[in-house]
Image (cartoon, rainbow, N blue to C red):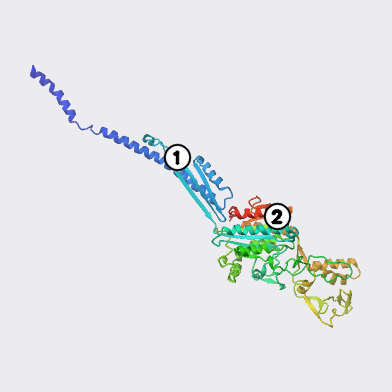
Amino acid sequence: MLMQRLTTNRPKQGKVASFLREESGVMAPHMLIFFFIMLLVGGLAVDLMRFETRRVELQNTMDRATLAAASLENLLVPQDVVRSYFEAAGLLENLDGVTVTEAMNSRTVSATATVRSDNYFMSMMDTPYLEALNTSEAEQRVSNVEIAMVLDVSGSMQNTPSRIANLKIAAKDFIDTVLDQDTDNKISISIVPYNGQVNLGPNLFSKFTVTQTHGTPNSYCIDLPTSTYSSTSVSRSTPFPQTPHVDSWSSTSTSNSYSTLAGPTYSNGLYSNMWCQPNAANYVVVHGNNRNQLKNAIGGLVAVGATSIDLGMKWGSMLLDPSSQSIVSELAGSGQVPSYFSSRPASFNDNDTMKVIVLMTDGENFTQERHNPTEYRTGQAPIWRSNGDGMLSVYHNRSNTSYDYWVPHRSEWRTAPWNSGSGTTRLNWNQVWAIARTNWVAWQLFARPLGGGSSSLRSDYYNTWRDNFRSYTDVTEMNSRLDQLCEEAKSKGILVYGIAFEAPTNGQTAIQECASSPSSTYFFNAQGSEIQTSFDLIASNLSQLRLTQ
């Protein structure tokens, strides 16, 4: 019986031993551990990828935003530009701050933003989220700045003396503020004083092909035809006549009797009613940065004469037109311009150069008088002057008589010029205009002798000869020329900043329409000492004048 029980239990013991010896399931615990680790690593990768995707998205948005805000072509507030990019991307809450640094010729925009991503798997490792601070900085810099200050020095600036005084203070401060920011000779300033004309000065005047010259010292103006106002350039090869040294504005007595020889009106050393006053104080200054010389030029300005805003704008834009580079180079070669500005003005498509005109007036365009070409500008006149008493005689070819010389101070006809026995000199027209105003010549030497005893004939001859001597450019045409020129300048990337200083409505309109924008960014309507504020704001905010090319 015992042997039977032992035999019966052997199979059970064999199964246990077999189970203990079996190795096929021994890896299951390790696989579970490895699976858990793989799941954790995969989750970690998912969390990291989610975070990196958001970080890259935010960084790309920030880079685009700072680049757009730093562009000098951008007219909007830089901080608003950055915020608009983040808002469009749905990331505005991530933006921490925007810093903008602006200088005369550059803008730097930097931004900081925090990216945060909640974790799905890493939270099990006590890391609920991932976070990083992103930064981006963009800068656009214009290396060179060319400025033309086009300043009204017409008689109205002196008629109210505070105007010219305030202008000088404001313009000098402007020069100081602008040049304080320039340590590398990158900023050049030209000064174009204008009234009825622009006195170029002998150095700049000599760079053009000028005809009908008169040689009067300190008088260097050129008559430009309307056709030149379609461009910012002035040809060096095209012949242009010099503005005559003549008083074509002042009136004269028109009674049927002699009035004393009336020359140009004279005031404070200037011929005030001439279109080109012989005044060295109002010469154009070309591309300089010596602040003492520039401020001395401003301090010496003399206000006199009429107002031709279009002409001032023409010469100001010419100094920024690359076609004048040869002129500046030659002036630099003769020491009239600093050598480091010899290659100015730069081309219009030079992205490293900002071109700016500051156009200022206290008035409006005033009808411009011009002497008619050739026959009454140069060459011999039919007029003789006595070498003794200086009295004039004029020759008229009258038929059936030998009494062809009219002597106005004697109110009589003669067979020879007055005092011909003692000596007379036949004058050329330049010499005539140097001693007699246009209206006096038209009346005393032409209307009186040719009109005879008829007042209506005298009046007709007077009007005829005044028209022979001179012609007009009316205000409508001058305004049209100004508009055309301003649009041309702006289309080429020249930034025009306008100041209407105690100007009438028409003057305000002209300046505002010429400015790069009618907004207060580019246009000021100043009264009294506000002109100083206007210039100060231009100087301190020149970086807000954006390149448009």
The spot of residue 434 in percent (x, y) is 77, 72
Q: Nearer the viewer, residue 13 or 131?
A: 131
- Residue at 89%, 75% (x, y): give it: 412
The spot of residue 237 in percent (x, y) is 64, 70
The 10 Å Cα crowd at callout 1, few under 14, some 14 to 19, many 20 or more, is some
The spot of residue 93 in percent (x, y) is 50, 39
Q: Nearer the viewer, residue 463 or 519?
A: 519
Whether residue 88 is situated above or below residue 299 in the rendered picture: above
Residue 43 falls left or right of residue 217: left
Q: Residue 397 appears in which quarter of the rendering?
A: bottom right
Residue 386 falls left or right of residue 113: right
Residue type pointed to by label 1: Arg
User: What is the spatial separation of the Cα atoms under label 2 and label 1, in whole angstroms?
Assistant: 55 Å
Q: Residue 480 appears in which quarter of the rendering?
A: bottom right
Circle 2: element type: strand
Whether residue 439 is situated above or below residue 539 in the rendered picture: below
Q: Residue 13 appears in which quarter of the rendering?
A: top left
Name the residue that disc number 1 marks.
116
Residue 14 falls left or right of residue 409: left
Q: Residue furthest right?
A: 453
Q: Residue furthest bottom?
A: 421
Residue type pointed to by label 2: Phe
Circle 1: element type: strand
Name the residue that disc number 2 marks.
501
Numbered disc in front, either 2 or 1: 2
Q: Is residue 492 visible?
A: no
The reply to whether discs 2 and 1 touch (Cβ–Cβ < 8 Å) is: no
Counting residues from the N terminus, which is met first, the one under dot 2 or under dot 1?
A: 1
Q: The N terminus is located in which quarter?
A: top left
